Image (spheres, helix red, strand yellow):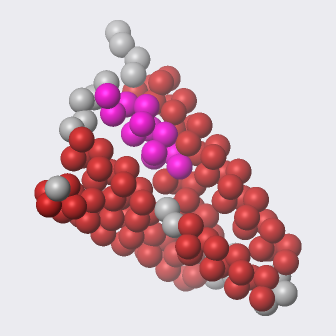
Amino acid sequence: MGIELLFVGIGGSIGSICRFLLTKLAIYLGFVFPLGTLVSNVLAGILVGLVFGVEKQLGFSPRVILMIRTGFLGGLSTFSTFSFETVHLAQRGLYGEAGLNIALNLILSLAGVLLGLHLAKTYLLTTG
C-alpha cells in the first residue's frame, strides 16, 4: 500500500500544481469569474474519459491508473474550490455568476467525460 500512496501523491501533486497555475493564469488575465477552476474541472473530465477509455487496451498498470486518475486528476479537479468560489460569488451579490458557475462546471465537466470517452474510442483505439 505504501507504493500506491506514493503514486497517488506524485500524481496529486502534479495535478494540484496544474490547477494552481491555471487559476493564477485566469486571475492574471483579469477574469473575475473563476475560470481557472472551470477549466481545471472540464479538462479533468476530458482526461478521465480518455484514460478510462484506453487504460485496459493500453495495459496501464494499476499503479499508473492510481497516479493518473486518483492522483493527477483528483488534484486537477476540485469540488471544494468550486464550492467556495460559488459561495464567494453569491456573497458578493453576483448571483448570476454563481448560478452560471454551477451550471458550467456541472454541464461542461460531464460533457468533458463524454468527449474524452468519444476521443478514446474514435481516435486512440482505432486499429488498422
Residue extending furthest toward the front: 1
In this picture, which residue range is highlighted in magenta? 45-56
- From what the image shows, is residue 112 above or below residue 128? below
Residue extending furthest toward the top: 128
User: Image point 39% across, 39% down: which residue?
Assistant: 51
Left or right position of 17 against 34 = left
User: Image point 68% across, 55% down: which residue?
Assistant: 106
Residue 92, by quadrant, is bottom right
- From what the image shows, is residue 1 above or below residue 120? below
Magenta segment main secondary structure: helix
Residue extending furthest toward the bottom: 92
Left or right position of 127 against 36 = left
- From what the image shows, is residue 116 above or below residue 18? above
Left or right position of 48 against 38 = left
- From what the image shows, is residue 14 above or below residue 90? above
Residue 118, by quadrant, is top right
On the rendered image, what quadrant is the N terminus found in? bottom left
x, y percent for residue 115: 57, 37
On the rendered image, what quadrant is the C terminus found in? top left
Residue extending furthest toward the left: 3
User: Image point 61% across, 64% down: which residue?
Assistant: 38
Residue 3, by quadrant, is bottom left
Left or right position of 2 against 113 = left
x, y percent for residue 62: 24, 41
Pick whichever, 62 or 120, lies toward us: 62
Q: Is residue 106 magenta?
A: no
Total labels: the figure holds 0
Could one spot residue 14 in this view of the protein? no
Could one spot residue 125 in this view of the protein? yes
User: Image point 36% across, 72% down: which residue?
Assistant: 17
